[in-house]
Each structure stands twice: as structure tokens, then as C-alpha cells.
Image (cartoon, rainbow, N blue to C red):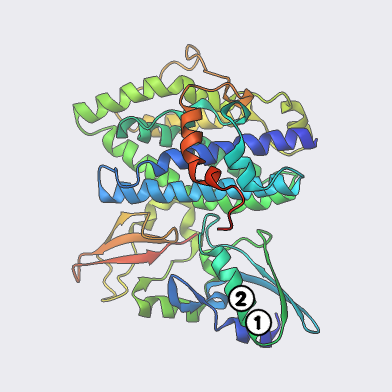
Amino acid sequence: MSIALKELLYKMADDQLILGHRNSEWTGMGPLLEEDIAFSSMAQDKVGQSLALYTLLNQLGESDPDTIAFTRNANQFHNCVLVELPNQEYDFSLIRHFLFDTAEALRFEMLTRSSYEPLAQLATKIRGELRYHTLHANTWIKQLGSATPESIGRLQKSLDYAIPYALGIFEASPHEDDLIKSGVFEGEQKLKEKWMAKVESIITQTSLHLPDWNLAQPLFGGRQGKHSEHLQPLLDEMSEVFKIDPTAEW
Amino acid sequence: MDEKILHILETVKDPEIPVLSLVDLGVITDVVVEGNNVLVKMTPTFVGCPAMNYMKSEVETALLQQGFETRVEISFEKPWSSDLISEKGKAALKKYGLAPPPSNKIFTDLEILETSNCPRCDGSNTEMKSPFGPTLCRALYYCHDCKEAFEQFKPL
């Protein structure tokens, strides 16, 4: 059981850390001051949530959070590829934020019922914080997804590009059955179904169109450590200061 | 919880909101006293709150100065919610210029966060500008009555 639980915690923590880092790249670059602050705040939330998840792993016998976060190479990370993709323009960052955070909010909602008590407690806490993230995403998707031909066109193009990566969030774990049977997590398939319904309920309020789910091909690999060429440079930058003196007291 | 210890902890304030004690903020979830040894359990307002370690060491210092051996444990056993802010704490927030959080019972549908009374003029003709502000626990608002921007301590 402990292997399955650790795998689940690693992929969730890595998702939060990597997307937190990408969000932080909007600091000082946002299209509006409020958006600059929003992406910076969500970065702080996500990196903080990754620390809490790495702390749970530490309590299960893994290394300390800083070592886990800053000393692994790309092929040792289990985040989905969606979160490591470069920010590109604001339309892509917004679509990714919407697609990922919708899944993340539902995942933590499901985990409030986890049989692993420390995770259920943490999920109860994080679920509340994520409501602000999904509120932010939904507000902007609804507004820009129904605004001008340019905003609709840009979001549609980013949506079409992001969907296969977004489906990669739900890449099944080799321990899926263990997690479900032991009540730790209800599983990626169930999460994906809830996510598709939620995404549809927002997109249908806009001029955007979702692809036919049956034809969309998921891009898998991230959960097994197979990443795009974008992850290693991100990790190098993120750990640059830490690696100057790994034993420094902060 | 032990009155004497809580009294000492009243002197430890939120570093970002110096009018609010950690007790009134609701982040002290348990105090266990055995002779001279004190165990304080704390929980963060937001998981990513960068002030947590600072508040933890402030608690240790305050109790140590009164001669107690202190251990502080961070736990999510009793997760923080803005409803844990005391009435005294809410009044202090308002006086400081931050709109106190409405009950988190209304939190199920976030769309209704659009309203918050202005802490300066009590006007209700206000508009949420952004659910994210200068710290994780604050949102940005504008008051159309007194034409001033203000911040709200977010319900959670």
C-alpha cells in the first residue's frame, strides 16, 4: 500500500510545484496588475501545497522536502506534461489554469474522503483554497470566451492544443486498483469523468467548443517520468540558488 | 485551553496584521500544559502562508520568556477557517481597515463573494476587483460609496 500511496503523493506534489513555478513566471509580466497578483498568489498557494504534500512523504520515510524538490532530475518527476509546458501567451496560461485547476479541485474534493487520514485532513484544507483558483479561472474563461473574435479565437486555439495534454493528467497509476480498494483515492477514471462534466458545464456558457472526447488522444508519459524538453531547464532554473550551497541555513 | 498560556499568546500578533493576536486569528488549535512543559498546536490560515515559521518562533519566544519549555506543532487536524476568527478579532480587523470575512457558510457558491461592506464608510455599494490581494488571505475591493479601494480578509 505504501508504494501506491507514495506514487499518488509524488505526482500530486510534483504537479503543484511545477505549475506553481510556471505561475510565478507571470510575476511582473501579467497583462493587468490584478492578473499579475492573481498568478503570483496562485503560485504561492501551489508551492505551499506541494511543501505540505512533500512533508507527508517525508513522514512516510522519503527525504526532506527541499531535497526532494531541488535535487531530482526531470526523469524522476511525476507531474503531468501539461504543467511543465512554457507559459506562452496569456491565453494558453489561462486555458491551462482552467483545465488543470478544475481537475485539481475535484481531486482534492475526492481526497477529503481518503482512508489515509493525514491526506484527508490536508485535502479538506486545500479544497477551500482552490475554490479561489477555480473562481478566478471560471470568471475569465466565461468573460473572454464570449468577448471578441480575437479573444475567442485565441482561447479556442489554446484549448485545442491543451486538451490532449490535459487528458494526460489522468494517466492511470500502476497501483490504481490498490488505491481504490484501500479507499485512499477513488481513481483517475472517476476523476476524469467528473472533470469532463465540470469543464463542459463552463465551456457551454461561452462561444468555445470542446473536441469530441472520443476522438481526443491523451498525451501520457509524465507520470512515468517521460517529459517534454521543457522540464529540465525549468528544474535547473528553480534549483539554481539551492545548488550553490545545499547545506545553507535559510 | 489553559487560560494563563492563552493570555501570554494574546501578546503574539499576526506579523502582517499587527492588531490581531494569534488567539483571535484562530490559528492556535490546542494547548497542552504539563508542569513547565507546553505543547502548542497551530494550523496555518493558508497552506502556503510564508509567515508560519515566523509565527511559530514568536510563540516559542513569548512562552520561553515566561519560563515555559515550549514545543510548537503544525497540524491540519483542525483546519483553519475564517469562522475561527473571534468577534474581538473581527472588530480589530475592521478598525485596522480590513473588511472582516463573512461567515464561510455562504462559501459554497463563490459568485456571491461579490459583496462586502466597506470597512471605512460601511457602504454596501462595493465591487470585488480581484479574489487575490497583497497576501494570500486578502482580496481586493472597491467602494463606490466613498470611492476608495479596500481589502477584505477572505472567507475560507
Q: Quadrant of residue B122?
A: bottom left
Q: Measured from the top left, where is residue B101 in percent x and y?
A: 43, 67
Q: How many marks?
A: 2
Q: Residues within 10 Å of mark 2 (few under 14, many from 20)?
A: many
Q: Measured from the top left, where is residue A100 in percent x and y?
A: 48, 34
Q: CA distance from mark 1 to mark 2?
A: 6 Å
Q: Measured from the top left, where is residue A145 in percent x and y?
A: 29, 32
Disc 1 target residue: B63
Q: Residues within 10 Å of mark 1 (few under 14, many from 20)?
A: some
Which element is circle 1 on? helix
Q: Quadrant of the N terminus of chain A?
A: top right
In the rendered structure, the answer to whether residue A154 lies left or right of residue A47 reads: left
Q: Which mark is residue B59?
A: 2
Query: Disc 1 is attached to a residue of which chain?
Result: B
Q: Measured from the top left, where is residue A23 in percent x and y?
A: 41, 41
Q: Is residue A208 visible?
A: no
- Looking at the rendered structure, the kind of residue marked 1 is Leu
As drawn, which residue projects farthest toward the top? A215
Q: Quadrant of residue A189?
A: top right
Q: Which mark is residue A45?
A: none
Which one is nearer the viewer's eye here, A225 or A172? A225
Q: Are the two marked residues, 1 and 2, in contact with CB atoms closer than 8 angstroms?
A: yes
Residue under disc 1 on the same chain as residue under disc 2: yes
Q: Quadrant of the C terminus of chain A?
A: bottom right
Q: Is residue B49 visible?
A: yes
In the rendered structure, the answer to whether residue A145 lies left or right of residue A46 reads: left
Which one is nearer the viewer's eye here, B15 or A126? B15
Which one is nearer the viewer's eye here, B154 or B70? B70
As drawn, which residue projects farthest toward the front? A244
In this view, B85 is above or below A24: below
Q: Residue at x 37, y 32 (%)?
A: A87
In the rendered structure, the answer to whether residue A93 lies left or right of residue B21 reads: left
